[in-house]
Amino acid sequence: MSTKKTVKDLQQEVDTYISQFKEGYFSPLAMLARMTEELGELAREINHYYGEKPKKKTEQEKTIEEELGDMLFVLICLANSLNIDLETAHNRVMHKFNTRDKNRWTKIEGEE
């Protein structure tokens, strides 16, 4: 049975995990490099499942879900290290999409 977690819960859980180590968070530049690595792994998995490049028999079985989880973890680490509240960041971007981009896409009837 899984428990629903808020974005704040996720950020606190990652911070609690990282805080147990003397090394703490990596530098923002190192985390950006790590995020880029994880994005490459996600791209590879998506290409295996939906693209023209099947997985080699010798390649380890991973899932898109696992790679998205890795991306989320690094993103949370980066936000935490920069004292960024991801819920606030999310609210700001949604406001932008709901105002600046509100007429950019074709709405489904009845969804206005």
Image: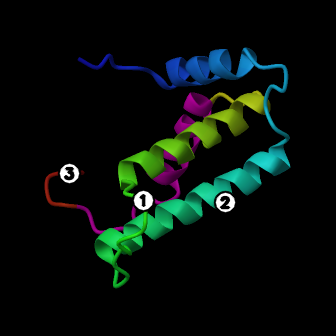
What segment is highlighted magenta in the picture? 86-107
Badge 3 crowding class, 10 Å Cα cut-off, few under 14, some 14 to 19, many 20 or more, is few
Nearer-the-camera pick, 23 or 86: 23
The kind of residue tagged 2 is: Thr
- Residue at label 2? 36
Cα gap from disc 3 to disc 2, whole angstroms: 36 Å
Of pointers 3 and 2, the one earlier in the residue sequence: 2
Q: Is residue 95 magenta?
A: yes
The kind of residue tagged 3 is: Glu
On screen, 33 above or below 9? below
Residue 95 shows in the view: no
Q: Residue at x 64, y 19 (%)?
A: 17
> Mark 1 or mark 3: which is in front?
1
Q: Residue at x 30, y 69 (%)?
A: 49
Cα gap from disc 1 to disc 3, whole angstroms: 43 Å
In what element is the residue under mark 1? loop
Numbered mark located on residue 2 in the image? none
Of pointers 1 and 2, the one earlier in the residue sequence: 2
> Magenta-highlighted stretch: main secondary structure?
helix
Left or right relative to 23: residue 5: left
In the rendered image, the residue lying farthest to the left is 110
Q: Position of residue 103 (x, y in %)?
A: 39, 64
Of pointers 1 and 3, the one earlier in the residue sequence: 1
Left or right relative to 28: residue 37: left
Nearer-the-camera pick, 6 or 112: 6
- Residue at label 1? 60
Nearer-the-camera pick, 11 or 40: 40
- Residue at label 3? 111
Say if mark 3 contacts mark 2, CB within 8 Å.
Answer: no
Q: Is residue 71 magenta?
A: no
